[in-house]
Amino acid sequence: MAQTNIGAVIESNSLPQPPSYTRSISDARKLRHIEWLVAGIGTFLVIGSMTLSFISNTCKQVSDLISEQNAVATKIAVSLDYYTYAYPVDT
């Protein structure tokens, strides 16, 4: 049985290697700027949505309060109108 040099066989039948991709410092810097931009926009969107949610809830509560006060004011006005006509004051 003859011995074969495995290293020679591997080198002769080796597959082409993909090109080595190296990032330059400027490419890394550009990627970092994009990451910061995406993070900033995401943060802005989260804070904006929270703010709009708080404003919406506050507007709903104020609207309910105004409606309740209008109902009470109408009852008071009807009561005052009743007492004005039912018990006139002589002047």
Image: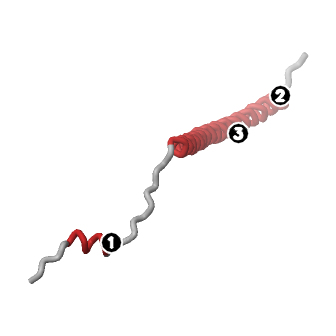
**Which residue corresponds to mark 1?**
14
Q: Secondary structure at mark 1?
A: loop
- From where the camera sits, is residue 57 visible? no
Say whether disc 2 or disc 1 marks the residue closer to the N-terminus.
1
**Which residue corresponds to mark 2?**
84
19 w.r.t. 72: above or below: below
Image quadrant containing the C terminus:
top right
Q: Amino acid at mark 1?
A: Ser
- Residue 56, quarter of picture: top right
Furthest-right residue in this view: 91
Label 2 to label 1: alpha-carbon separation: 108 Å
**Residue 60 versus residue 56: which sits nearer the camera?**
56
Say whether disc 2 or disc 3 marks the residue closer to the N-terminus.
3
Furthest-bottom residue in this view: 1
Frontmost of labels 3 and 1 is 1
Marks counted in the figure total 3
Q: Within 10 angstroms of label 3, few (less than 14), some, or many (20 or more) residues?
A: few
Residue 40 left/right relative to 78: left
At 42% across and 64% down in the image, what residue appears? 18
Q: Secondary structure at mark 2?
A: helix
At 31% across and 75% down in the image, what residue appears? 13
**Residue 38 versus residue 20: which sits nearer the camera?**
20
Q: Within 10 angstroms of label 2, few (less than 14), some, or many (20 or more) residues?
A: few
Q: Position of residue 2 (x, y in %)?
A: 11, 81
**Which residue corresponds to mark 3?**
67
At 70% across and 34% down in the image, what residue appears? 69
Q: Position of residue 39 (x, y in %)?
A: 54, 42
Image quadrant containing the N terminus:
bottom left
Residue 12 left/right relative to 74: left
Say whether disc 3 or disc 1 marks the residue closer to the N-terminus.
1
**Residue 45 versus residue 39: which sits nearer the camera?**
39
